[in-house]
Image: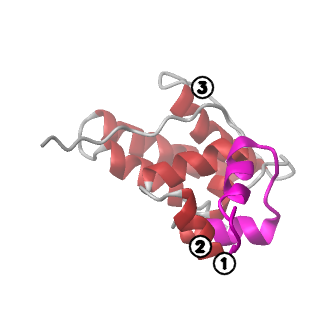
Amino acid sequence: MFNFYAYPELKDLSQGSRIAFVRHFRHKSQDFVSKELGLTGECKRRTMTRYERGDRNPKEDRTKEIAKILEVNYHSIKKYDFKEPSDIFYLFMWMEEIYPNFGFKMNMQEDDRINRAFITWSNMKNKRNNNEITYEEYIEWKLNFELDE
């Protein structure tokens, strides 16, 4: 018997697609997440399906619950409104999953924490490219990265 792992695929940058990506990465079913959320009834996973398809967006409290269940940083799966510069940073990290060769240069002198975050990310990408860490370790880092305050 062969055991293999298929990497999850991010179909777009929507909140629902990001939640689905993380859920697949964690090897969790919609039923599992629904149960952990305390959803009941015959169609308890329908809520998760709607979130992942983008038919509905979870409220902030529900998103925090989902993040806790999936063991990720809330900012990885929240709905970005781009009122905070950090939303752009997290969006760029997700863009890399769709466009692996995505590259850019930024100079955000006004927000030193964003500069530090980009440097940290660049260092982690180099570790992954040099096979110092695995793809799974790299994704794990991205899903749990928090910007300095």
The amino acid type, in three-letter code, at marker 1 is Gly
> Residue 23 location, x and y as percent?
52, 54
Q: Which residue corresponds to the image point at 68% horizontal and 47% vertical from the top-left?
A: 52
> Residue 116 location, x and y as percent?
57, 51
Residue that label 3 marks: 104
Instruction: Write down the region rendered in magenta.
Output: 38-66
- Helix, strand or loop under label 1: loop
Q: Assess whether mark 1 and mark 2 are in contact (beta carbons under 8 angstroms).
A: yes
* Distance of label 2 from label 1 (alpha carbons): 5 Å
Query: Is 57 located above or below residue 17 in the figure?
Result: below
The amino acid type, in three-letter code, at marker 3 is Phe
> Residue 39 location, x and y as percent?
69, 73
Q: Quadrant of the C terminus?
A: bottom right
- Helix, strand or loop under label 2: helix
Label 1 crowd bin: few (<14), some (14–19), many (20+), radius 10 Å: few
The amino acid type, in three-letter code, at marker 2 is Lys
Question: Quick one: label 2 or label 3, which is nearer the N terminus?
Answer: 2
Instruction: Choose mark 3 or mark 1, whichever is in front.
Output: 1
Residue that label 1 marks: 38
- Residue 72 appears in the figure: no
Q: Assess whether mark 1 and mark 3 are in contact (beta carbons under 8 angstroms).
A: no
